[in-house]
Amino acid sequence: MDSLWISLFVFTSLSGASCEEDLSGKVFVFRTEPSEAYVILKPLPQEPLQNFTVCLRSYTDLTRPYGLFSYATQSQDNEILIFKAKPGEYRTYVGGEYLSFKVPENRFDWEHICFGWESATGIAEFWMNGRPWPRKGLKKGYTVGAKAFILLGQEQYHYGGTYDSYNSFSGELTDVYMWNFLLSPHKIRSAYQDLQLPQCALGWKNLQYEIKGDVAVKGRLRLQA
Ligand SMILES: *[C@@H]1O[C@H](CO)[C@@H](O)[C@H](O)[C@H]1NC(C)=O
Ligand SMILES: [Ca+2]
């Protein structure tokens, strides 16, 4: 972190626009439908990625398509994208190509998902609520670009830019993490159960973020006592 960044960070923190926070037990509530809002995640990763895992937990009654996690670079807007195409299908993108994972519909509950990928084999893992789906593969040998613009709640059409609110997320989002390696099955189950996790640059317990638009940070409501 250089001093310019620190002063910018302090300045924006004071203005309430940007913060680094331990968000344990909290959620982002995207209140409107459709929504123009999104949450920018920082810091920008400075290294290209050969392996990664992204985990997050969401809760919504939307049946239209929506973007959850959008990692865009200057040259590829769908560098990494987690997109719910319909109630029974997630699409996970790497380098502009996607895999489709069929999931149960109408569960009406929180959905915890992890998407992991490794370049060496192109193997992609999709986990939902602590269970692995049959592995698939894409973009073997590819390197995910650095200096990405990462946001939650929209699907970027261009780096840092336009999106279509028809693909916006409305509902609740929590427990967002990204690692630059494939998380072990044991740790993916830990992520699902919200237990101790390996250090990461982008994590819910030390999240640097900036809210754009109508998103509130609130305590998580438990479904059961
Ligand atoms: C990515 O994963 C592969 C296979 O697990 C490993 O050999 C390689 O060193 C990893 N690359 C980086 C940059 O961590
Ligand atoms: Ca896109």
Image (cartoon, rainbow, N blue to C red):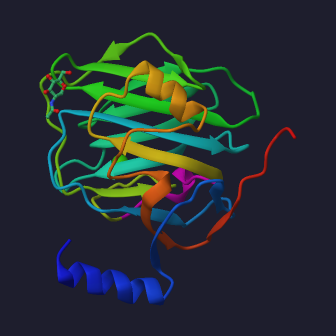
Residue farthest to the right, as pictured: 225
> Which residue occupies 39% across, 49% down?
70
User: Which quadrant would residue 106 be assigned to in this image?
Assistant: top right
Measuring from the top left, give residue 12's x and y in whole percent. 40, 85
* 165 inside magenta stretch: yes
Measuring from the top left, give residue 193's x and y in whole percent. 61, 32
14 or 120, which lies in front?
Answer: 14
75 or 216, which lies in front?
Answer: 216
> Which residue occupies 52% across, 34% down?
191
> Which residue occupies 26% across, 60% down?
44
Left or right? Give the position of 161 relative to 118.
right
Measuring from the top left, give residue 148's x and y in whole percent. 25, 55
149 or 91, which lies in front?
Answer: 149
Q: Quadrant of the C terminus?
A: top right
Left or right? Give the position of 3 relative to 7.
left
> Which residue occupies 26% across, 21% down?
138
* 189 inside magenta stretch: no
Compared with 161, 96 (above or below) is above
Q: Where are the magenta residues, as a range?
A: 162-170
Which secondary structure class fits the magenta region best? loop
User: Which quadrant would residue 46 be assigned to in this image?
Assistant: bottom left
